[in-house]
Image (cartoon, helix red, strand yellow):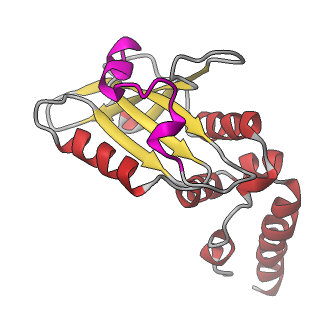
Amino acid sequence: MPNRDSTHSATLDLTSIDDEQFESLIAAIFRAKILSPVTDQNAPAESLSHTVVSVSHTGRGADEGKDLMVITWVRDCVITRQFKWLVQCKHKPKSKRSVQQSDFKNNPSFIDLVRHHGANGYLLVCGTRPARNLQSLFDSLTADDGNPYQFIIWDGTKVSEEAHKHPEVIEVFFPDYYHSHFQFEFDDVVGWLKRN
């Protein structure tokens, strides 16, 4: 059978989409992770673990540091519970600059932002990559024992990696890429089936 991983090693050209499309891409990636609507906390734990439950988008206008709210189920050795991710997208398609702390209005306290929105964690999604000092800040916030929140950054490579798990999302946002990479994969599988 053809090697499926070979087509998934390419990186998407995120510079081909604008800021609004980038936010919609991230929302679509999370929506694609919704396996089925799970509302029963007493459902079997293995069916809930790391399952996206809902994705809400703030829409246009001032977002107060929140582009998306993603609710997931997480499970540890004691309990299965909901976990709310405050997601903020920063996309610099033209300049390709890294995301800096100065890119955030009024230099917010990220802990206060998470608390304000009633979330458990903050996910910064960058179309490029974070500046080293921003990554260090997020690492130190997460490592701080006095801080109950998680702070994670996805860079452009991680966005591409996550999108490749959902070809239907790539088809919508990157149709040319989809047809050149995934159609080729489909033709390989059909050819392999005919030969075997």
Q: Is residue 146 left or right of residue 68?
A: left
Q: Is residue 182 left or right of residue 158?
A: right
Q: Is residue 34 left or right of residue 134?
A: right
- Residue 140 lies in magenta, yes or no? no
In the image shown, does 90 or 106 lie closer to the viewer?
A: 106
Residue, x 41% and y 14% (percent of image)? 117
Q: Quadrant of the N terminus?
A: bottom right
- Residue 108 lies in magenta, yes or no? yes
Is residue 35 in view? no
Is the residue 116 above or below the residue 102 in the image?
above
- The image position of residue 70, as x and y in percent, is 49, 27
Q: Quadrant of residue 50?
A: top left
Is residue 21 in view? yes
- The image position of residue 176, as x and y in percent, is 88, 60
Residue, x 77% and y 82% (percent of image)? 192
Which residue is the extreme one toward the left? 145
Is the residue 189 above or below the residue 149 in the image?
below
In the image shown, does 76 or 150 lie closer to the viewer?
A: 150
Residue, x 45% and y 54% (percent of image)? 131
Q: Quadrant of residue 74?
A: top left
Q: Quadrant of residue 91?
A: top right
- The image position of residue 56, as x and y in percent, is 59, 20
Is the residue 66 above or below the residue 195 in the image?
above
Is the residue 166 above or below the residue 119 in the image?
below
In the image shown, does 57 or 17 lie closer to the viewer?
A: 17
Residue, x 72% and y 18% (percent of image)? 60
What's the magenta region?
99-119
Q: Quadrant of the C terminus?
A: bottom right
Q: Is residue 129 left or right of residue 101?
A: right
Instruction: Report the number of discs.
Output: 0
